[in-house]
């Protein structure tokens, strides 16, 4: 099987958000580690962030002119359907050129046309669902898929044969090394606050507004705050004025180092972030995005809170005093944080990329048997 797959292409289609792209890239790294001569081709949308991401990381890729269908006006949906049909034709052309052994749909609307084309051509499909609930694209593609690798353990899916709880592939830096949790490090309670690579204006505002009330504990607390570019200078100045020990940056290049130091994380509830929190055993205050098109974040956060792994604050309702109260509660109850961290171990999936790759090989092997193809005598390592 190893020789057969070394000679074949695997297509990974994904896009829209970093939450779909990063797990796909981590899967690619695992695949190339096993089959170094194989060709991994990425397919995304011309309109998503993958357009920049794929080029930056020098991946081999195609971009389709396709858009999402969710939360749009009728005219936008008509346009999206037209683009889907158009990109379906392009997808057939890509499949004909590369003849992939399997297509992995890593989520996002960009995966729709390529996975559908693969299904119509009889090419096996494996889906990845990073969030607690299925996204729209994966709901539509489910009947055509051989399986769905889920990133978070939703009991509704886990009892169905087509689903496996594999976890989300995350960067190795969040897995390797010593991740022992200590509520107090270097004599201080360390808070890591961020809202994704672009920052969150709401989280930034809540953090800044809380500083005067946290000033009484300034000798006990250290805050690491990723603001994004827009709020960086103003936020940094607020920390300076309040005299609270901090590290304020527009972007943390190696944020896993900040995770390692963190006693508490304050962040959104995207699937990749949730998986990183679980893998590192860091308790969190989650502020899920509640806007149209981001409804998947609340179920992610609810899973964490219902299993006593995190707390939820609704950004539409929370006031500064409640925000500060949540931070102080965490500071004053280190035993509760340690219990949260310990409990995360049973949900951690450090081998997610390997498990998904194994499943892909299993699906391809079954397809080869059906097609009467034989291995060339060399077993997988």
Image (cartoon, helix red, strand yellow):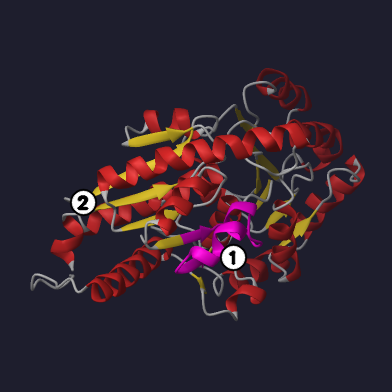
Mark 1 crowdedness (10 Å alpha carbons): few <14, some 14-19, many ≥20: many
**Is residue 147 rendered magenta in the image?**
yes
- The percent coordinates of residue 291 (x first, y second) are 78, 41
> Would you name the residue on which mark 1 appears?
152
Which of the two labelled residues, at mark 2 and mark 1, occupies the earlier sequence position? 2
**Left or right: 6 in relation to 204:** left
Marks 2 and 1 sit apart, C-alpha to C-alpha, by 29 Å
**Left or right: 165 in relation to 209:** left
Mark 2 crowdedness (10 Å alpha carbons): few <14, some 14-19, many ≥20: some
- The percent coordinates of residue 322 (x first, y second) are 89, 48
Who is closer to the viewer here, 67 or 303? 67
Q: Quadrant of the N terminus?
A: bottom left
Range of magenta residues? 127-149
Residue 111 appearing in the image = yes
**Left or right: 20 in relation to 35:** right
**Left or right: 307 in relation to 275:** right
Which mark, by number, is residue 38? Answer: 2
Seen at 83% across and 37% down, the residue is 210
Is the Cβ of the residue at disc 2 closer than 8 Å to that at disc 1? no
The quadrant where residue 133 appears? bottom right
Q: Is residue 100 above or below residue 77?
A: below
Seen at 14% across and 73% down, the residue is 374
């Amino acid at each position: 099987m190893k020789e057969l797959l070394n000679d074949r292409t695997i297509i990974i289609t994904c896009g829209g958000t970093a939450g779909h792209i990063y797990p796909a890239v981590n899967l690619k790294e695992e695949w190339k580690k096993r089959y170094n001569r194989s060709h991994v081709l990425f397919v995304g949308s011309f309109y998503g962030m993958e357009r920049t991401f794929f080029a930056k990381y020098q991946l081999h890729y195609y971009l389709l002119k396709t858009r999402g269908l969710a939360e749009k006006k009728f005219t936008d949906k008509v346009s999206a359907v037209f683009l889907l049909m158009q990109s379906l034709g392009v997808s057939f052309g890509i499949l004909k050129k590369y003849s992939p052994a399997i297509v992995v749909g890593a989520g996002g609307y960009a995966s729709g046309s390529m996975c559908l084309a693969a299904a119509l051509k009889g090419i096996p499909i494996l889906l990845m669902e990073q969030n607690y609930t299925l996204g729209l694209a994966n709901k539509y593609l489910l009947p055509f898929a051989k399986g769905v690798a889920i990133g978070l353990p939703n009991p509704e899916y886990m009892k169905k044969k087509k689903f496996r709880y594999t976890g989300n592939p995350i960067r190795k830096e969040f897995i390797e090394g010593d991740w022992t949790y200590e509520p107090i490090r270097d004599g201080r309670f360390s808070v890591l606050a961020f809202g994704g690579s672009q920052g969150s204006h709401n989280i930034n505002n809540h953090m800044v507004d809380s500083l005067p009330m946290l000033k009484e504990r300034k000798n006990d607390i250290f805050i690491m705050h990723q603001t994004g570019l827009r709020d960086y200078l103003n936020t940094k100045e607020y920390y300076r004025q309040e005299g609270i020990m901090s590290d304020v940056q527009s972007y943390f290049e190696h944020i896993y180092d900040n995770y390692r130091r963190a006693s508490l994380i304050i962040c959104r509830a995207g699937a990749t972030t949730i998986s990183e929190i679980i893998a590192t055993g860091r308790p969190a205050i989650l502020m899920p995005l509640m806007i149209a098109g981001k409804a998947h974040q609340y179920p992610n956060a609810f899973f964490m809170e219902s299993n006593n792994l995190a707390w939820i604050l609704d950004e539409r309702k929370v006031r500064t005093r409640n925000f500060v109260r949540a931070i102080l509660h965490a500071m004053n109850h280190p035993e509760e944080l340690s219990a949260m961290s310990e409990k995360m171990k049973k949900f951690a999936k450090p081998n997610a990329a390997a498990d998904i790759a194994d499943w892909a090989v299993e699906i391809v092997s079954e397809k080869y048997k059906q097609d009467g193809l034989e291995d060339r005598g060399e077993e997988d390592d």
